[in-house]
Each structure stands twice: as structure tokens, then as C-alpha cells.
Image (spheres, grey):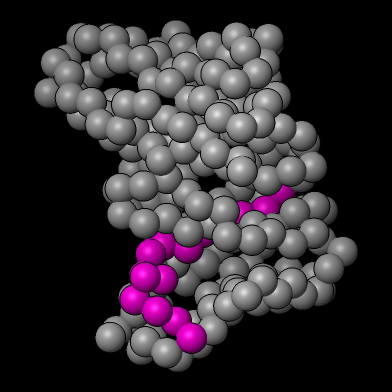
Amino acid sequence: GEDVEQSLFLSVREGDSSVINCTYTDSSSTYLYWYKQEPGAGLQLLTYIFSNMDMKQDQRLTVLLNKKDKHLSLRIADTQTGDSAIYFCSGGGYQKVTFGTGTKLQVIP
Amino acid sequence: GAVVSQHPSWVICKSGTSVKIECRSLDFQATTMFWYRQFPKQSLMLMATSNEGSKATYEQGVEKDKFLINHASLTLSTLTVTSAHPEDSSFYICSARDQVNQPQHFGDGTRLSIL
């Protein structure tokens, strides 16, 4: 099955860019997703990228996919305190999606 | 769009009680719904996948008689934790999608505390 790995913690200053990295093992993953989870809440879909794409940009969010290295990253430009949360990357095919361990992003005012 | 409503948000019950959690897709038809369990500071663990009108497919190690899942309509799935015990205390999250090539959309989760 798919294994998805993320770093556990990232701390940045308000206004800086944040880059959250993720590696996965299943090269046949069709979709790769980024979700945001605030304390005590469910997961909010931020963005997703198809496996045949290299990059996707959506306002302050930029997703980069390196299929050769099975590496996915999420860049948040001009990070705000409201971006503090846990970010999960996930990947999979049509039937099952595997979630990473989550990266806790701390934004320092 | 793509809103999933989960109810209740938090429930506290005595040991031995059965608890039902509802998951509704409000503005789309959820042909597939997923139930996850999340322990503190951990990732999501998939418990089961349910397709509308079919029996749920449970992940290895998840007791189907303990966690009853019903997906009787395209907008509603329920998870019933039968005869709940303190070890069942956890954060339960549902998700739903309409087509196989679309992402899952998540409810806000249910915090279950069994005394």
C-alpha cells in the first residue's frame, strides 16, 4: 500500500513563505491532495493535483509535484497567523487514499 | 459547494451505550462515504468505505459488529458505535465524494467520549 511521509513540525514568521514537504511511495497515485485541519475540526480540502501535472497555483498556494522523486510540496506565500494548523498530504487512486502523518505549522506573529 | 455536515460534534456517554453519528452531504450526491478515526496528534485511520446501497467495506482490524455503518441514501451515512467502551473514545471523521475521480470532502468530526 501507499506510504506517505511528512515532517512533523514547521515554524515560520508571519509574512514569510512556508513550504511543507511530503514524500509518497506509490508511483501509481492518481491524485495528490493537501488538507488543512484546525484544532477540533475536520479536514478542509485546500488543493489537489493530478499526477500528470508538475505545478498548480491557487492564490497564495503553490503545489509542486516531482514524480521522479515522488515528492510533493505545498508553498504558502505571505503566511498568516490564520494559516496555523496541521496540514495533511494524501495520495491514492480511485478507491483508497492514504494520509500522511500531518505537519503542524506554527506561525509566529 | 461540496459541504459535508457531521452530527453531533461532541458526545459524552456512559460505557455500554450505543452512539450514532450522522454524516450528510448537503449539496452533492455522495456515492461513496468514508469513516475515519483520529487519535490525538495522529493521522487519520480509515475504518471503512461505504457505497450507497451496498454493505460497507471494513479495513483490517476494524470490527464490523462494533462499528455499524449504514449508507441508505445518496446524502446520508451513519456510523453506530455499539456498546461503546472508554477505549472507543476518539475523534471520528466522515468524508464523502460524488465521483471516483473527485476528492473527498470532510465533515467537521465528532468527538466521542465514553466514561
> Residue B90, relative to residue B114: is it above or below?
below
Q: Quadrant of the C terminus of chain B?
A: top left
Q: Is residue A63 visible?
A: no
Q: Is residue A31 magenta?
A: no
Task: Locate residue A68 relative to residue A38 in the image: left or right.
Answer: right
Q: Is residue A22 visible?
A: yes
Name the spot of residue A59 as percent of width and height, x first: 62, 75
| Region rendered in magenta | A78-92
Name the spot of residue B57 as percent of width and height, x first: 62, 20
Residue A74, picture quadrant:
bottom right
Name the spot of residue A42 as percent of width and height, x first: 42, 45
Q: Residue at x 54, y 78 (%)?
A: A76
Task: Locate residue B24 relative to residue B82 in the image: left or right.
Answer: right
**B37, A58: nearer the viewer:** A58
Q: Is residue A84 magenta?
A: yes
Q: How many marks?
A: 0
> Residue A78, relative to residue A58: is it above or below?
below
Name the spot of residue A104 as percent of width and height, x first: 38, 68
**A92, B19: nearer the viewer:** B19
Residue A35, picture quadrant:
bottom right
